[in-house]
Image (tube, grey):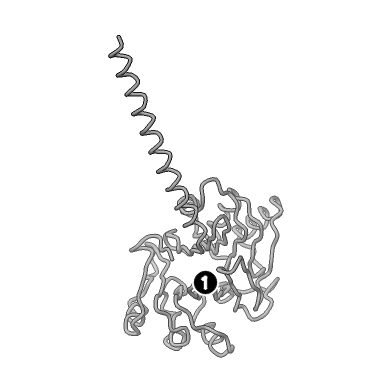
């Protein structure tokens, strides 16, 4: 009887010891995750043929575009802190489905503080859906303007460098060249986020006396041949080029652009080949 009791005591203390070890390991892991989550990070999310960029520091997030569907929700669930259902700022570069569609899903499923977009006249159903959700959920709207700054702490500083003029209420046949262009500092690196602008807007940026020099360039329009001109690459002089792209019928990214980047010794990183890209 005594021997059985001693055996039970040993088992009890062994299980207790394992429990203590587990809790210590969990605490250390939690602290590491907490410390890691406080760093400024930028994620080029894999949403297929579309753009979605999340900038995060701790429980503060800025989301730029959202792809065209529900993939964005899985991506956010993967990288945002557990239980965080709030996005401080979302930015819609322009109204094409592969940039705005996912943001509709985000606004339906997350609390959103502010939305930044150009405010151009848009009678597409997706724009009407956006406006209805903004009104219903009382989301503050900011119209993107040259020089507008979005800053969180010392490690995230985004500046709108295009469009040059107020586009609110104006009509355009093609929204690509109305894309909000952002030059941002995230941590120790600089980024140029270009939406779907063409080489025409790239030329405007070159002659606009702006600081375009960056470490990382988000290639415009998923690697379309109508963007990423040599002169623009020389002005930006990036070390890395991000191409956000998925299966498509447009031929994106084109061999012409891939060869151009390679010939200028710019490292190419593609979401269709590497999935989510994190810096």
Q: For the residue carrying disc 1, how many other residues have a C-alpha within 10 Å: few (<14), some (14-19), or many (20+)?
A: many
The residue lying toward the viewer, choosing from 203 and 218, is 218
Q: What residue is shown with label 1? A: 195
Question: In which quadrant will I find the N terminus?
Answer: top left
Residue 157 is drawn in which quadrant?
A: bottom right
Residue 71 in percent (x, y) is at 46, 53
Q: Is residue 98 visible?
A: no
The reply, left or right, for residue 98 in relation to residue 90 is left
Question: In which quadrant will I find the C terminus?
Answer: bottom left
The residue lying toward the viewer, choosing from 155 and 272, is 155
Q: For mark 1, give the secondary structure.
A: loop
Relative vertical location of residue 171 with respect to residue 8 in this rendering, above or below: below
The residue lying toward the viewer, choosing from 106 and 224, is 106
Residue 85 in percent (x, y) is at 58, 49
Q: Is residue 269 visible?
A: yes
Residue drawn at x 56%, y 49% as measured from the top left: 84
Residue 144 is drawn in which quadrant?
A: bottom right
């Amino acid at each position: 009887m005594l021997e059985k009791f001693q055996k039970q005591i040993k088992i009890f203390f062994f299980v207790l010891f394992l429990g203590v070890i587990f809790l210590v390991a969990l605490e250390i892991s939690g602290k590491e995750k907490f410390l890691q989550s406080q760093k400024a990070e930028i994620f080029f999310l894999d949403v297929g043929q579309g753009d979605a960029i999340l900038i995060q520091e701790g429980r503060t997030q800025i989301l730029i575009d959202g792809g065209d569907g529900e993939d964005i929700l899985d991506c956010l669930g993967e990288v945002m802190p557990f239980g965080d259902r709030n996005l401080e700022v979302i930015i819609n570069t322009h109204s094409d489905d592969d940039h705005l569609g996912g943001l509709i899903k985000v606004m339906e499923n997350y609390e959103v503080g502010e939305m930044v977009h150009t405010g151009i006249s848009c009678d597409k159903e997706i724009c009407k859906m956006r406006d209805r959700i903004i009104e219903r959920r009382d989301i503050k709207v900011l119209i993107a303007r040259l020089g507008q700054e979005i800053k969180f702490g010392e490690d995230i500083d985004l500046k709108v460098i295009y469009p040059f003029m107020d586009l609110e209420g104006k009509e355009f046949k093609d929204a690509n060249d109305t894309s909000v262009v952002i030059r941002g500092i995230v941590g120790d690196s600089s980024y140029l986020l270009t939406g779907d602008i063409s080489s025409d807007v790239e030329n405007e940026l070159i002659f606009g006396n702006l600081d375009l020099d960056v470490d990382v360039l988000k290639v415009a329009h998923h690697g379309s041949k109508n963007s990423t001109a040599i002169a623009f690459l020389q002005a930006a002089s990036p070390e890395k080029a991000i191409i956000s792209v998925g299966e498509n019928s447009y031929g994106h990214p084109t061999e012409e652009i891939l060869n151009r980047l390679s010939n200028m010794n710019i490292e190419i990183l593609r979401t269709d080949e590497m999935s989510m890209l994190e810096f």
